[in-house]
Amino acid sequence: MTDTPHRPTHIRSFVLRQGRVSSAQARYHEEGLPRWGIPYRAEAIDLNAIFGRPAPKILEIGCGMGETTATIAAAHPENDYLGIEVHTPGVGSLLKEIATRELTNLRVAQHDAVEVVRDMLPEGSLAGIHVFFPDPWPKARQQKRRLIQSPFVHLLVSRLAPGGYIHCATDWEEYAQQMLEVLSAEPMLANTVEGFAPRPDYRPLTKFEQRGLRLGHGVWDVVFRRVL
């Protein structure tokens, strides 16, 4: 159920590193992934069948260590959430959150987000998409790896139902400007405000973000809705 080794047809926005996996993360990964994981396969899935109910489906790309994802899912039991994360420590941590919080509305896919969205998610199946603090790839030669690029945004929007939203957040100002430009250029989207958005209540402040704000660092949110 982990990332399938093959040659991708796109530039990946991540590099798999051999990070340390704690014993707890390893245990929850081993025990939880068969229960709450969605294995990659190149065919469309039925999200209502997976969650056992018809409810708004929210996709989160890049869950990190999972605390924010789990907090949002716990606060909004009326929605179902699919989190995508490639790194095993983060997936193990998120599965621990699902188990300890007894969340029934959260599932995990450990695979490349581009391939999951492209191959598994039906068009119009999502009510919302979260992309919080993706890797900014700050060096000029790295920026081709950034997740928020026009082709992927167009793919994401095709998976949104009309009226569905895409919410991106970053603490890297230059990337924030790129996000705003790319989403503004997508004809199927309209900005919910003029320019950057205030942080919606559903997105909790992370400890890292709180520390940055105390130090005077900026955080930028962009929230667009599908209109076509």
Image: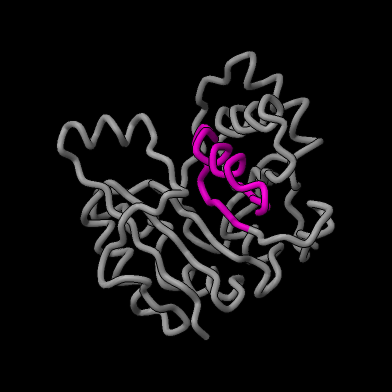
Image side of residue 7 versus residue 198, left or right: right
The residue lying toward the viewer, choosing from 151 and 6, is: 151
Q: Position of residue 137 (x, y in %)?
A: 32, 48
Q: Image quadrant of residue 102? A: top right
Question: Does residue 139 lie above or below 35 as drawn?
Answer: below
Q: Position of residue 53 (x, y in %)?
A: 81, 57
Question: Does residue 91 lie above or below 165 as drawn?
Answer: above
Q: Is residue 7 magenta?
A: no
The residue at 55%/70% (across/down) is 164
Q: Residue furthest left?
A: 216
Question: Does residue 199 lie above or below 34 as drawn?
Answer: below
Q: Image quadrant of residue 185? A: bottom left
The residue at 60%/66% (across/down) is 127
The residue at 52%/27% (across/down) is 18
**So how many labels did they put on this image?**
0
Numbered range of the magenta stretch: 58-83
Q: Position of residue 39 (x, y in %)?
A: 75, 47
Image side of residue 221 versus residue 85, left or right: left
The residue lying toward the viewer, choosing from 24 and 225, is: 225
The residue at 47%/42% (across/down) is 15
Give the position of the N terminus as an image quadrant.
top right
What is the basis of the colouring in this image? Answer: one colour
Question: Does residue 74 lie above or below 52 as drawn?
Answer: above
